[in-house]
């Protein structure tokens, strides 16, 4: 591709969605964190739990600590990844003679603070919950991915009503609404209050089920 072609492609991408260029690599980073979160919890079912749960009989307390660490880690790593991505992509655009996004734009700041960090936190907590129920990091990551991908993939098949009412309630779409990335009126958009409630419902439901199930599980 020529330099002119590259400039045109980047300009077109940013014109279509002003944050798409910034967070183009966030998916890989997010799912790498999701796997680490799942492995952090699933390790208890590969022998470590025999020692952990002898020292602390309250298994729910151990799970709660791990969930807090996953949430804090997701927010911190996501924020750092966002800042680095903004610095890299907007620097490249400026060097190529294209107008970068204004760093004082409230929408950009909201996206930097929330999009990747909240996505890592939410998906990581969901994967942690699945790791308890499925006892496997790989299976929990796959299950978390299926929640995000399958309903969206079915939208072209199931028609207009499904597309307009179902995908927006997925955790990934709700996070995009929280971060201000989803366009108002689009199929993936939820108002801030509903997006917040949706994220809390997904995470709390799965984590509560995992916490209730954990005390009755055979760790071996």
Image (cartoon, rainbow, N blue to C red):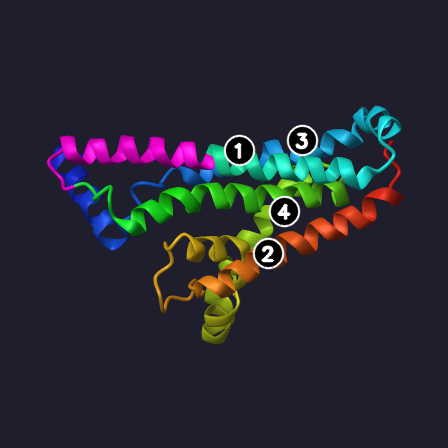
Tell me where the magenta segment starts and ends, as one range.
Answer: 78-99
Residue 61: image quadrant is top right
- Numbered label attached to residue 171: none
Query: Is mark 2 in CB contact (under 8 Å) with mark 1?
Result: no
Q: Looking at the image, is mark 3 or mark 1 earlier in the sequence?
A: 1
- Numbered label attached to residue 40: 3
Can you see residue 2?
Answer: no
Residue 54 position within the rendered picture, expressed as x and y whole percent measured from the top left: 88, 27
Q: Helix or strand or loop: what does disc 4 sit on?
A: helix
Query: Is mark 1 in CB contact (under 8 Å) with mark 4?
Result: no
Q: Helix or strand or loop: what does disc 3 sit on?
A: helix
Residue sitting at x 52%, y 62%:
154
Residue 196 position within the rendered picture, expressed as x and y whole percent measured from the top left: 52, 59
Q: From the image, which quarter does the C terminus lie in? A: top right
- In 3D space, how far apart are the residues under numbered discs 2 and 3 (Cα atoms)? 22 Å
Q: Looking at the image, is mark 1 or mark 4 earlier in the sequence?
A: 1
- In 3D space, how far apart are the residues under numbered discs 3 and 4 (Cα atoms)? 13 Å
- In 3D space, how far apart are the residues under numbered discs 2 and 1 (Cα atoms)? 22 Å
Residue sitting at x 49%, y 45%:
118
* Mark 1 vs mark 4: in front: 4
- In 3D space, how far apart are the residues under numbered discs 1 and 4 (Cα atoms)? 14 Å
The residue where tag 1 is placed is 32
Q: Helix or strand or loop: what does disc 1 sit on?
A: helix
The residue where tag 4 is placed is 126
Magenta stretch: includes residue 154:
no
The residue where tag 2 is placed is 200
Crowding at dot 1, Cα within 10 Å, few <14 / some 14-19 / many 20+, comes out as some
Q: Helix or strand or loop: what does disc 2 sit on?
A: helix
- In 3D space, how far apart are the residues under numbered discs 2 and 4 (Cα atoms)? 11 Å
């Amino acid at each position: 591709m020529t330099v002119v072609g590259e400039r045109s492609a980047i300009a077109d991408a940013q014109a279509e969605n002003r944050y798409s260029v910034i967070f183009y690599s966030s998916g890989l980073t997010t799912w790498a964190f999701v796997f680490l979160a799942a492995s952090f919890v699933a390790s208890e079912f590969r022998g470590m739990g025999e020692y952990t749960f002898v020292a602390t009989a309250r298994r729910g307390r151990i799970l709660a600590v791990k969930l807090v660490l996953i949430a804090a880690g997701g927010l911190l790593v996501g924020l750092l990844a966002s800042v680095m991505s903004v610095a890299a992509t907007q620097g490249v655009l400026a060097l190529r003679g294209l107008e970068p996004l204004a760093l004082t734009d409230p929408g950009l700041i909201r996206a930097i603070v929330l999009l990747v960090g909240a996505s890592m936190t939410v998906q990581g907590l969901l994967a942690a919950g699945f790791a308890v129920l499925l006892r496997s990091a790989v299976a929990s990551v796959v299950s978390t991915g299926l929640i995000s991908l399958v309903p969206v993939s079915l939208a072209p098949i199931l028609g207009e009503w499904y597309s307009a009412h179902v995908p927006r309630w997925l955790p990934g779409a709700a996070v995009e609404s929280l971060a201000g990335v989803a366009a108002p009126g689009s199929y993936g958009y939820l108002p801030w209050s509903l997006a917040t409630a949706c994220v809390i419902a997904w995470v709390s439901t799965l984590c509560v089920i995992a916490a209730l199930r954990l005390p009755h599980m055979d760790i071996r």
